[in-house]
Image: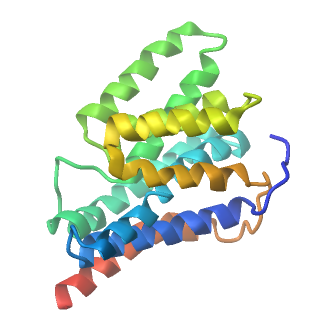
């Protein structure tokens, strides 16, 4: 993928997503729903997931081994499940909801199917199966989340991709998650100013470990206040 003109690199975009996610989770765990402060925190948090979806596509294009990339996501999906359930459901395991790493892993697997489907139409079968899997296991953001990842991949070569991604993201947000997710459209603007550069590549594991660690920390703080 060629570099583009923009304000921030891959590292900065990840940091924006991580900070937005942290604000979102603080709002969800500590602030009473229905208050203006709650709506502000959750609104800021809507920016995080679309950026992570976009970065999955970027990672797919740049990784030396899609299998190893998928394996890392799956490993952290397992590691993150207990922190996820503790933080959001106050239980060690909730079978009705799975954490976002699993959504990202399924989305990455779908990208592999889309890539291979160009030369082998049989990959349409696992592609459909993966969408069904996202639905039945109730991973975070579910089918809509996986579709958002695929949307970034499919539209990346379009000449007017900013406008197309803005419209399609808005439709996905509204149809799958409701009007409360629409502030996530700000992420499309942030992505538009991504310069295509990698940036600081020494903190890869920070972004993997931050998710389960911050959920555990927030849970333990909540239990003590």
Displayed quadrant of residue 171: top left
Specify how the rendered protein is coloured. Answer: rainbow
Q: Nearer the viewer, residue 128 or 53?
A: 53
Displayed quadrant of residue 11: bottom right
Residue 200 in the figure: left or right of residue 145:
right
Residue 21 in the figure: left or right of residue 205:
left
Q: Outermost residue, top direction?
A: 121
Q: Does any portion of residue 107 appear in the rendered image? A: no
Residue 83, how many percent across, how many down?
A: 29, 67
Residue 93 in the figure: left or right of residue 212:
left
Residue 51, how many percent across, how many down?
A: 56, 53
Q: Residue at the spot x=59%, y=15% of the render?
A: 117
Q: Residue at the spot x=36%, y=65% of the render?
A: 42
Residue 151, how many percent across, how many down?
A: 55, 32
Residue 196 in the figure: left or right of residue 171:
right
Residue 197, how many percent across, how many down?
A: 80, 56
Quadrant of the snapshot with the N terminus: top right
Q: Does any portion of residue 167 appear in the rendered image? A: yes
In this rendering, the answer to whether 141 lies above or below 111 is: below
Q: Residue at the spot x=54%, y=32% of the render?
A: 150
Displayed quadrant of residue 103: top left
Q: Residue at the spot x=62%, y=32% of the render?
A: 164
In this rendering, the answer to whether 13 lies above or below 41 is: above
Quadrant of the snapshot with the C terminus: bottom left
Q: How many marks?
A: 0
Q: Outermost residue, bottom direction?
A: 225
Q: Nearer the viewer, residue 168 or 10?
A: 168
């Amino acid at each position: 993928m060629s570099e583009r003109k923009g304000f921030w690199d891959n590292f900065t975009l990840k940091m924006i997503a991580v900070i937005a996610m942290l604000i979102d989770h603080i709002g969800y765990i500590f602030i009473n729903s229905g208050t203006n402060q709650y709506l502000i925190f959750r609104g800021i948090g809507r920016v995080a997931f679309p950026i992570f979806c976009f970065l999955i596509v970027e990672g797919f294009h740049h990784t030396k081994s899609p299998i190893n990339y998928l394996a890392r996501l799956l490993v952290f999906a397992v590691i993150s499940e207990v922190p996820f359930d503790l933080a959001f459901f106050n239980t060690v395991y909730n079978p009705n909801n799975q954490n976002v790493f699993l959504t990202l892993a399924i989305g990455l697997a779908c990208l592999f199917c889309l890539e291979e489907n160009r030369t082998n139409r049989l990959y349409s079968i696992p592609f459909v199966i993966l969408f069904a899997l996202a639905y039945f296991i109730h991973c975070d953001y579910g089918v809509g989340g996986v579709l958002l990842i695929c949307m970034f991949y499919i539209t990346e070569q379009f000449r007017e991709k900013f406008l197309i991604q803005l419209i399609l993201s808005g439709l996905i947000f509204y149809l799958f998650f409701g009007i409360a997710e629409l502030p996530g459209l700000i992420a499309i603007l942030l992505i538009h100013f991504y310069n295509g550069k990698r940036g600081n590549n020494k903190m890869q594991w920070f972004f993997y470990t931050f998710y389960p660690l911050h959920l555990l920390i927030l849970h333990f703080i909540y239990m003590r206040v």
